[in-house]
Image (tube, rainbow, N blue to C red):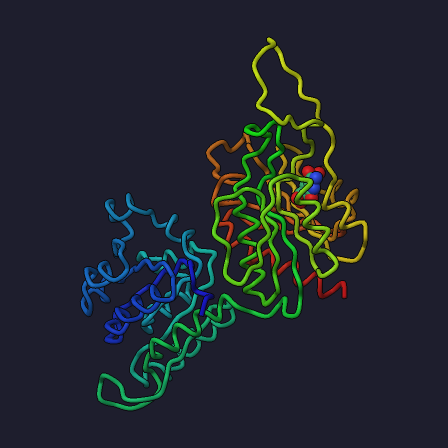
Amino acid sequence: MQTLLGKHILLGVTGGIAAYKCAELVRRLRDEGAEVRVVMTRSATEFVTPLTFQALSGHTVHTDLLDPEAEAAMGHIELARWADAVLIAPATANMIGKLAQGIANDLLSTLCLATQAPIAVAPAMNHIMWSDQATQDNINTLRNRQIAVFGPAFGNQACGETGEGRMLETTELIEKLASIFSHESLRNTRVLITAGPTYEAIDPVRFIGNRSSGRMGFAMAEAAIEAGAKVTLIAGPVHLKTPPKVDRIDVESARQMHQAVMSQIDDCDIFIATAAVADYSPAQTHDQKLKKTEETLSIQLRRNPDILAEVAATGKVFSVGFAAETEQLEDHARKKLQSKQLDLIAANQVANHDRPDEDTGFNSEYNALDIYWANGHIQLEKARKTELARKLINIIAEHYKNKH
Ligand code: C5P
């Protein structure tokens, strides 16, 4: 099961006897390749010590909202952003009630309000508590808010009674958690993605490049795989691991990227151009290293082919562009949407002088996007690129389906 590979799982442990089973859960999640951070409520620490979870997860366990040491390691808002999914296991009736009411009076309930990641709860309690109308009403409220409810199962309970209220077994919890990341919105769809920068050679050792890390494109490839697509990723020079199941073609220059895209495009339904392609390349690439002889040096540049515009002009594939802008975001993005005949464009502000502390864009793990199409717009707030990519893939899938 590769869906949990590299995923950041925030495990919230609340005060029920089933908490002891979560020691095994952490182990198994790590076996699946997930990174796990554990948050415990006060009462959970009465059942299992934080040290157990610290040893198994390899990270400090967070228990207090106002613990300066834990906050210094990773603050609660950072933790909320870090998560790709939050799993609360076991989830007590009390925690379920707090989530339903939006109460934020401890670290875990606060994190649930502060995160944009999907949340799942694995209820565990006495069967009469589970069937109580208050608990059932709260559970329905959570379901209506798209919070996943895993279980509970029927069986023997710690209190000696039998009924519905046992926490699901570890294997079932892991399967259900993995299913959060895989859906079928792009089943039977072939997606071609460009990512990263391009390097335009001046001579054998020098090039013109840019600061693109490729993270957004790689996150898009991973999210498209999770949505059931067949994905080919054409990557410029980047230092990133290929996401599972993705076919990768490495290129260096804009012209090589152009060639690679054109060789693949006939087999594609959707083209997503996240690459920061150089608009110009040196008109002449010197065979030998240039020597510093003159006081000034001019390099003549020639326009590179616009890969995205060329693909979109064929009208055969659903085309999605990216636009990194330093000003007048909507204006520039809409102009590109029109001139390149795109179906969708995802725009982000780079080097925002009004918010110099914002860590988004080119070389960051975070981004914020404004998505434009002919008669609409949606804003995706700042989040990790992996989280944003999942949302953007869903938007693309919806528009692609509507078009066909
Ligand atoms: O025109 P501009 O470079 O700002 O457009 C950005 C979008 O166009 C991105 O999606 C980028 O991947 C794509 N692009 C391209 N080929 C180029 C230049 C940009 O595919 N030569």
Compared across the picture, whether 111 is left or right of 240 comes to: left
Q: Residue furthest right?
A: 314
Looking at this view, name the residue that lies furthest to the bottom: 162
Q: Is residue 91 above or below residue 403?
A: below
Q: Is residue 51 above or below residue 187?
A: above
Question: Horizontal placement of 5 versus 166: left or right?
Answer: right
Task: Please tell me which residue is depicted at 77% across the width and 50% down the height of the picture.
Answer: 312
Residue 272 picture location, percent across and down: 66, 52
Residue 328 point in image, percent of width and height: 67, 34
Quadrant containing ligand 1 reads: top right
Is residue 145 shown above or below 349? below
**Does residue 330 appear in the picture of this structure?**
no
Residue sitting nearer the eye, 48 or 324: 324
- Name the quadrant of the C terminus: bottom right
Q: Where does the image place residue 189, in percent across and percent down from the top left?
A: 67, 66
Q: Residue at x 59, y 38 (%)?
A: 349
**Count of residue discs:** 0
Quadrant for the N terminus, please. Answer: bottom left
Q: Residue furthest top?
A: 295
The percent position of residue 21, horizontal first and vertical second, equals 26, 74
Is residue 267 visible in the rendered image? The answer is yes
Q: Is residue 299 left or right of residue 107?
A: right
Eyeballing the image, is 311 above or below 119?
A: above
| Corner quadrant of residue 211 | top right
Q: Nearer the viewer, residue 130 or 33?
A: 33
Observer-nearest residue: 91 or 339?
339
Residue in the picture at 27% in, 89% down: 156
- The quadrant in which residue 198 appears is top right
Look at 37% across and 73% down and name the residue there.
Answer: 122
